[in-house]
Image: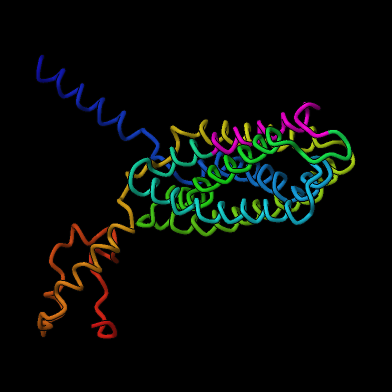
Amino acid sequence: MNSMENMDHQQGRRTTKSNQRPKGGLITMPFIFANEVCEKLAVVGFQTNMISYLTEQLHMPLTKAANTLTNFGGTGSLTPLLGAFLADSIAGKFWTITIASIIYQLGMISLTISAIVPKLRPPPGEEASGGQLAILYISIYLAALGSGGIRPCVVAFGAEQFDESDPKQKNSTWKYFNWYYFAMGASMLVAVTVLVYVQENIGWGIGLGIPTILMVVSITSFVFGYRLYRHLDPSGSPFTRLAQVCVAAYKKRKLPMVNDPRLLYENEGLDAPISFAGKLIHTKHMK
């Protein structure tokens, strides 16, 4: 009886395991697309018309406002290096996107509050005070920091939901990229037309409040799909591997080249994350 019960128990475990749906695939796309559409509406709606907000609401001189936006754009272009490093080395893409989105959300909330509360804006004819500018700078640099974790990870995270070794999912990858860029373009179009119109003609509180609310929807939809995603472990920073290659190349610069290129492949397991089919492609162009 015990042996029969053990067999039934093992059979039940195998059946339960086989009935589990593999994670990833097209079922994850609504959550990722909802995140991307809302995030793009929020980000573009936040940034596109910011020069008007600085000059009309904070009464900044045009040159100072342009300089502020240039600094914000430059910071936002550098922070993806940090975001990509953290995603690849420590946190993984899901948690990097989630935490970065929350940081971005905090920046948008503080800016929206400053647009709603009259005391946080200067009176007509006066330039913003030091405290009012401090709120502005904290808001936009939180947004720049948050965008550094979102921009380099969302596309790659979506691509990771498809197993390239599965022919069906491999074909689905192309559908993902097509719909992803279509959704991104459509959301940006809405942001630069509808949201800018609201900001200019209805009010900055509503015009900035809408992207702030959309960012909440973006984070919620992304986190809601957690159990459906494929979560790949961090593979290590490419900067570390690049440094290792440079050091190894320098140390071995005087070693004679082997006659058989196959002898160059020393450890297929270690090479696999940075090569094709576990092997680095041999070339004579960079001896």
Q: What residue appears at the point 72 percent right and 55 percent down from the top-left corner?
A: 66
Instruction: In the displayed orientation, state which residue is furthest to the top.
Output: 1
- Magenta stretch encompasses residue 282: no
Q: Is residue 201 above or below residue 64?
A: above
Q: What residue appears at the point 46 percent right and 52 percent down from the top-left corner?
A: 156
Q: Quadrant of residue 23?
A: top left
As drawn, is 24 to the left or to the right of 75? left
Q: Is residue 91 above or below residue 244?
A: above
Pick the front one: 272 or 179: 272
What segment carries the magenta color? 101-122
- Quarter of the picture containing the C terminus is bottom left
Q: Quadrant of residue 127?
A: top right
- Quarter of the picture containing the N terminus is top left
Pick the front one: 9 or 141: 141
Q: Is residue 167 above or below residue 214?
A: below
Residue 264, image x, y percentages? 15, 74
Q: What residue appears at the point 85 percent right and 33 percent down from the top-left corner?
A: 123
Residue 223, image x, y percentages? 51, 32
As drawn, is 133 to the left or to the right of 91? right
Main structural element of the magenta stretch: helix, strand or loop?
helix
As drawn, is 19 to the left or to the right of 161? left
Q: Quadrant of residue 278?
A: bottom left
Pick the front one: 61 or 225: 61
